[in-house]
Image (cartoon, grey):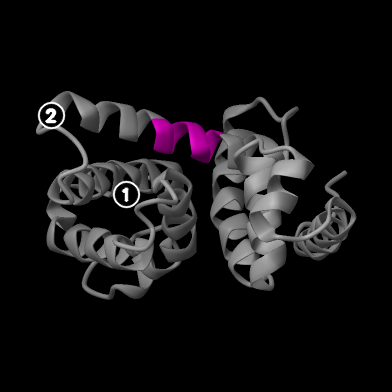
Amino acid sequence: MSNHSFDDSTALERYRAYLHLLARLQLDRRFQAKLDASDIVQQTLLQAVRGADEFRGQTDAEMAAWLRQILAHNLANALRDLGRQKRDVGRERPIQADLDQSSARLESWLAADQTSPSQRAVRGEQAVQLADALAGLPEAQREALTLHHLQSWTLDQVAEHLRRSPAAVAGLIKRGLRTLRNHFPAQE
């Protein structure tokens, strides 16, 4: 990663869709009406700007990990404030682990066979790009892909949730994947 400038929040803005996707994956659907992932992500980015001197990393992967930590803290606080969780600081760690796992799923979805450190760094950067590409899809395609591929729902579960037939959901997923593949041409 080249030099991140925290004086100009545009350096962090490139992580917005990535953080939003991770936040949505962590928020139980029951809470999504009361908690807005966009608000939590905005708070996360503001805290990152304010706490720029705390960032000790050098790479995009380190930046993403640091932002995931802030996001985990903000998600835990928001859930606690809803009164849905006990005031247990130990609950924050599982949220961080879940965020890291969701991020890892994004990366593995991109290229499971890349193993060198430079390839892992590229994959981390692609996870941010994938989140941006997902954000650009029509809502139904984005939701179908997220539920099916990132949350491991069956086609029938996604169909029931979206109130569509399994065949219609399969079409949404197929079109969404085709669009995403155009963002990530095959690398030889």
Q: Which mark is residue 40?
A: none
Q: Which mark is residue 67?
A: 1
Q: Residue furthest left?
A: 87
Does 65 sit left or right of 121 as displayed? left
| Real-space CA distance between mark 2 and mark 1, rounded to the nearest whole angstrom | 19 Å
Asked if 165 appears above or below 105 in the picture, the reply is: below
Residue at x 22%, y 63% (from the top left corner): 43
Does 23 sit left or right of 69 as displayed? right
Magenta residue span: 98-104
Q: Secondary structure at mark 2?
A: helix
Q: Secondary structure at mark 1?
A: helix
**Label 1: few (<14), some or many (≥20) within 10 Å?**
many
Q: Position of residue 56 (x, y in %)?
A: 23, 42
Quadrant placement of the C terminus: top right
Nearer-the-camera pick, 36 or 180: 36
**Label 2: few (<14), some or many (≥20) within 10 Å?**
few
> Could you tell me the amino acid type at mark 2?
Val
Does 30 sit left or right of 80 as displayed? right
Q: Position of residue 65 (x, y in %)?
A: 37, 41
Nearer-the-camera pick, 168 or 73: 168
The residue carrying mark 2 is 89
- The majority secondary structure of the magenta stretch comes to helix
